[in-house]
Image (cartoon, helix red, strand yellow):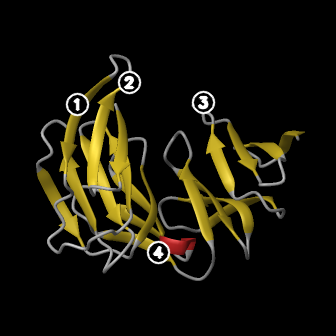
Amino acid sequence: MFGAVDRARGRVVLFNLREGRRLLEFVPGFATVVSNASLSIALSGDRVAVGRGGGDGGVVVHDANDGRKIIEWAAPRSQRLEFSPDGKLLLQVGRSRRSLHLWNALDGTPRWAQTDDYHAARFTADGRHLARYSWGNQLQLIRVEDGMQVMVLTDNYYQEMAGDPSGQLIVGANPLGFIRGFDAADGRQRFEVQ
């Protein structure tokens, strides 16, 4: 399943890419309506989380099968959302990347937040860590449990990152075209390309 935001109509659209067909379309069920607010989405199994980038922010979770609203909670304005691999947690990068929040995706309770820097982050394949970039600390591995640093991967500018499905490698990239791969166990650089 693939999800997209129809910004012109303020709707979430879900697709089956293999079959090339639209599965579902719905208006996010926020309690208050904010026209022209940017939306960000994340998919996990049968759930779709929608974060609002304008107005008073907020997160709403819908059933991906029928569009039914499951839960909504107050949250800062969103830039990007991502479910943990098991779907139990929701990572939120705040609007303008000024904050990083981790939520219980089932009931909307906050786990922890970091609001002191410019942030980008992604879950590692095992869901136990986040690869996190911030201006002050650069690219590092932090624990999902408490948001504390495990190790610094590089002190250079690598604000885009991804992990391989095996969980053994974290890859960072920057706008200058440099890509570095780091061992997820010990932080050692394994390759660099440009």
* Residue depicted at x 61% and y 36%: 167
Q: CA distance from mark 3 to mark 2?
A: 24 Å
Mark 3 or 2: in front is 2
Task: State the SS at label 2.
Answer: loop
Q: Position of residue 78 (x, y in %)?
A: 42, 67
Residue at the location (83% across, 64% down)?
Answer: 155
Instruction: Pick the residue in front: 149 or 99.
Output: 99
- Closer to the N terminus: mark 4 or mark 1? 1
Asked if the residue at tag 4 contacts the one at tag 2, i.e. Cβ–Cβ closer than 8 Å, the answer is no
Where disc 3 sits, the SS reads loop
Task: Give me the disc on residue 166.
Answer: 3
Residue placed furthest toward the top: 19
Q: Alpha carbon of mark 2 to alpha carbon of mark 4: how far? A: 35 Å
The residue indicated by pointer 1 is: 23
Q: Residue 113: which numbered mark, if any?
A: 4
Measure the alpha-carbon separation of dots 1 and 3. Answer: 30 Å
Give the residue type at disc 1.
Leu
Q: Are marks 3 and 2 in contact (CB under 8 Å)?
A: no
User: Foreground mark, 2 or 4?
Assistant: 2
Q: On the image, which quarter does residue 44 sit in?
A: top left
